[in-house]
Amino acid sequence: MNAPATESAQVRASARRRRARRGVAALEAVIVLPLMVFIIIGGVEMYLYTRVMAVMDRVAFTLANSISIQTSLTDDSNCTSPDHICTYGVLVPTLLMPLAPKNAAVIISVYATNTPFNGGPPSAWTNISSPNHGWTKIVYQGASAATPTSQISAATLPTSIISRNLQTADTVIVVEVFYKYQPFAFSGAFFKLFFNPQQYSRALIRPRYADLCRLINPANPAPANSICGS
């Protein structure tokens, strides 16, 4: 007589268990799915960020290395020859691929010591403090990039890297690359808590065949510098 009631109770219990399992699955989905989406977006964001830094390093080194083999540099509008400084600005969009050139800017500088080492204490670095003693020029600025400001100065360059050459002053080429990184809108606020959207990379290298401490202006040529010898 009690068999139907027992079976009915078992059916109801089984239904409750199924509903409970569905509830647990729904709760897991509510917790896990947003977390998985966040992890996936975070992984993509980190990949894009590291790619930006790698490309910026490549651009800085490539430009610095290319400039270092020149015997002179001219500042005019003929941007087809490697000894004209504007040529390196023309190359920037190609070197930046696959990044957006509109977000980038590049500064090229040359710093020179004011005297040879001469066996004494290290000389000081100079930049545009006297004729032919170095220069700084913005060679590229994308449409969406802010006007860049050099992060290096004569005061911040270490004197310990100055050559001990007794005859001539030392010079160093500095290429600085700036890039405005734009994270996903979803993760932008979180990204800005840990990273600066304005990314920066630089490369320093010595000229190989000439000091390059004078940027030649054909319209107003300056005399050769007695120390740098340009």
Image (tube, grey):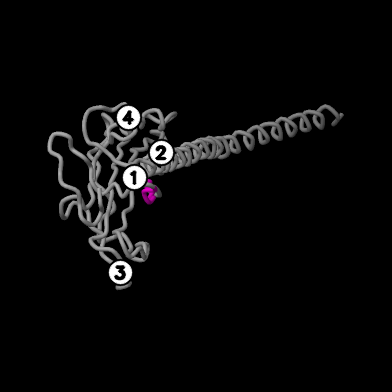
Q: Residue 175 carries which label?
A: 1
Mark closest to the chain's N terminus, 3 or 1: 3
Residue sticking out furthest to the left: 220
Q: Do the residues labelled 1 and 2 touch (CB within 8 Å)?
A: yes
Q: Residue 59 carries which label?
A: 2
Q: Residue 81 carries which label?
A: 4
Quadrant of the rendered structure where residue 82 is?
A: top left
Q: Mark 3 points at which residue?
A: 118
User: How far is mark 2 from mark 3, CA to CA?
Assistant: 36 Å
Q: Which mark is residue 93?
A: none
The x, y position of residue 90, in whole percent, is: 32, 29
Mark closest to the chain's N terminus, 2 or 4: 2
Question: Is 17 situated left or right of 221 in this image?
Answer: right
Asked whether 220 or 124 is in front, the reply is: 220
Mark closest to the chain's N terminus, 1 or 2: 2
Residue segment shown in magenta = 199-208
Mark 1 lies on a secondary structure that is: strand
Mark 2 lies on a secondary structure that is: helix
